Structures are given as C-alpha cells and as structure tokens.
Image (spheres, helix red, strand yellow):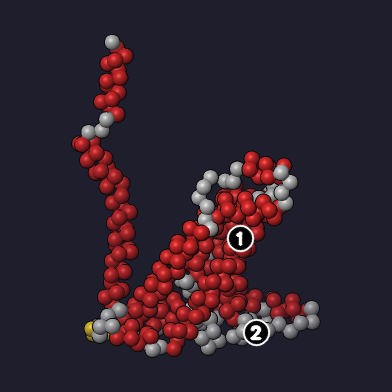
Amino acid sequence: MASITNVGAARRVAAPTGGGKKGQGWVALAYLWPGLTGFVVFIVVPLVGSLVISLFEWPLFGSPTFIGVANYEKLFGDPTFYTVLFNTVVFAFVYTALNLALALGIALWLNTRLRFAGFWRVIFFLPAITPMVANALIWRLLLSQDGLVNSLLGGAGVEGPSWLSDSQFALASVIAMSVWQSFGYNVIVLSAGLGAIPKEILEASRMDGTTAWTRLRHIILPMLSPALFFTMTMTMIGAFQVFVQPQILTQGGPGEATNTFVLYLYRNGFVFDRLGYASALAWMLFLVVMLITALQFAGQRRWVNYDK
C-alpha cells in the first residue's frame, strides 16, 4: 500500500501542470533578459541607427540632410570602393587559408604525444592575447627598410625589399603579421577537437596497417570537420573586419595597396567627416559577410561530419 502511494506521488511530481509550464517560462525569461537586453541595445539599435544614418548626408558636426539612397549610388560609382573590396577579399581568403593550414599543422604536431605540449600551446597562444597595436608596432620595426629582417638578409648577401612601402610586398606583410597574431586561437580549438577523437578508433586503424596519411584523410579530418568549420567561419568573419594591422603597418599604403574595407569606412566616418557614406559602407560590408557566411553554411553539408 505504501509503495502504491509513493508511485502516485511520484507521478504527481513528474506530470507538469499548465501553471508549472508558465512558471518555467518566467524563469527562463528571467535568465534570458540580460542577454536579450544587451543584444537589442548593442546590436539591433546600432544596426537600425546606421541604416537610418546611411540615408542622410550626415557630417560629424552639423545638421543632417536626407538624401535617400544617394550614398549607395555614390558607393557603386566610387573606384576606391572596388579597390578596398578587392583588397579585403584577397586578404580574407589568403589569411584564412594560411591561418587554418598553420594552425592544423601545429595542432597535429602537438597531438603526437609531444613532451611539454601544454607549454607550446601557451607559447603559440600568447600573440592572440597580447595587444594587437603593440604587435603591429613591433612588426613595423622588424619590416622597416633598416629593420631586423633586412639586416639579416643583408648579412646573407641579399638586399631586402621595402616590405611595407612596396606594393608587391605590403599586403603580404600585413597578412603575415595577421596570421602570426591570431593562429594560436585556432591551434587551441583544433587541439580540443583532436583530443575528442576516440583513441580506440585510431589504434584500430593502426592495427589494420593504415598509414599516417590514410588516418589523417579518412579518420582525423572527417571527425575534426566540425571544429574546422567553426574555425574557418569565425576566421573569415574576423578577416573581413581587419583594421588595426593595415592602419599601424602601412596606413593603407602605398597608394591603396593595403587599404581595407573597415579602414576606408573609418576614414570616411571620422577623417573625411562623412558619417552617412561610412554607414552605407558598413551595410555593404554587413551584406558581404552575411553572403559569404551563408555560402559557408550551405556548403558545410558536403564536408562537415557531425556523426560520432
């Protein structure tokens, strides 16, 4: 009799009532409202505000004048817009490819039962947590005409180029500094992904006589594909927002060789006093990033494996 009473009580506790669901909804809302408030205040409101500003001729100090979509029409007739878009796309794809290749190679190396692997992870991660401005200033000293790099090349009998003032090398120098700055973050993410691969599967493949290349291609990379997709997406989004590196290293030069989208946007808004045009540029950048991110998510169905 006592057991029957206990079962009945348990059912009463397990079966949620309508009032309980409402109560859970309020509890969930209480947990979510700080994040929702921050999303609305810091994301939605600025987005809507920039869209409104892009419809005005809006000087930094002065009265705005409504001009409709004139800023967007001007944008498509601006040759510098196409130059900075091309520079940014080249930077984004080359930087992302080099970053992921380097991070994957080092993550695989650190996953080979290497002694002091944790120490090396810290060393590789240090540039990612140091101020980017300070790193860029150091790289500017290293790559200057009489800097350490050209001094070492001169000692070997090679005349070093003008890394930062020659249009053939300037963008490559910005990409090299950017990869060095940030690949450590992807090393940490990919190392975590490699650590999640069951050791039994790798041991079984070794017992079957597979080579290291076969294991990498048919076991490790497919099981690591969710982490690779995450790092590729986040790295690409960050690449389109590159600003500090060209601003400190080359100031967008020589000419427009390293002028990027966000740098051009910043100069229009806060140097040339054209907030409306800068807002139109910001919306174009938003649409480009959204388009590329959507293509990445559409394409990930073909190569990302979420099966365990």
Q: Is residue 25 above or below residue 107?
A: above
Left or right of residue 161: residue 293: left
Q: Is residue 209 visible?
A: yes
Q: Nearer the viewer, mark 1 or mark 2?
A: 1
Most distant residue in the left direction: 19
Left or right of residue 13: residue 228: right
Coordinates of residue 160 in the picture (x, y in percent): 71, 82
Give the residue at mark 1: 103
Tell me the SS state at disc 2.
loop
Which residue is at 71% across, 52% downward? Answer: 212
Left or right of residue 239: residue 150: right
Most distant residue in the top direction: 1
Q: Is residue 62 visible?
A: no
Q: Residues within 10 Å of mark 1 (few under 14, many from 20)?
A: many
Q: Is residue 140 above or below residue 11?
A: below
CA distance separating discs 1 and 2:
28 Å
Amino acid type for the residue under numbered disc 2: Ser
Q: Residues within 10 Å of mark 2 (few under 14, many from 20)?
A: some
Q: Is residue 149 above or below residue 6?
A: below
Which residue is at 36% across, 74% downward? Answer: 283
Which residue is at 64% across, 78% downward? Answer: 143
Tell me the SS state at disc 1.
helix
Coordinates of residue 96 in the picture (x, y in percent): 55, 67
Q: Earlier in the sequence, mark 1 or mark 2?
A: 1
Give the residue at mark 2: 162
The answer to whether marks 1 and 2 mark residues whose Cβ atoms lie closer than 8 Å is: no
Q: Which mark is residue 21?
A: none
Q: Quarter of the image containing the N terminus?
A: top left
Amino acid type for the residue under numbered disc 1: Ala
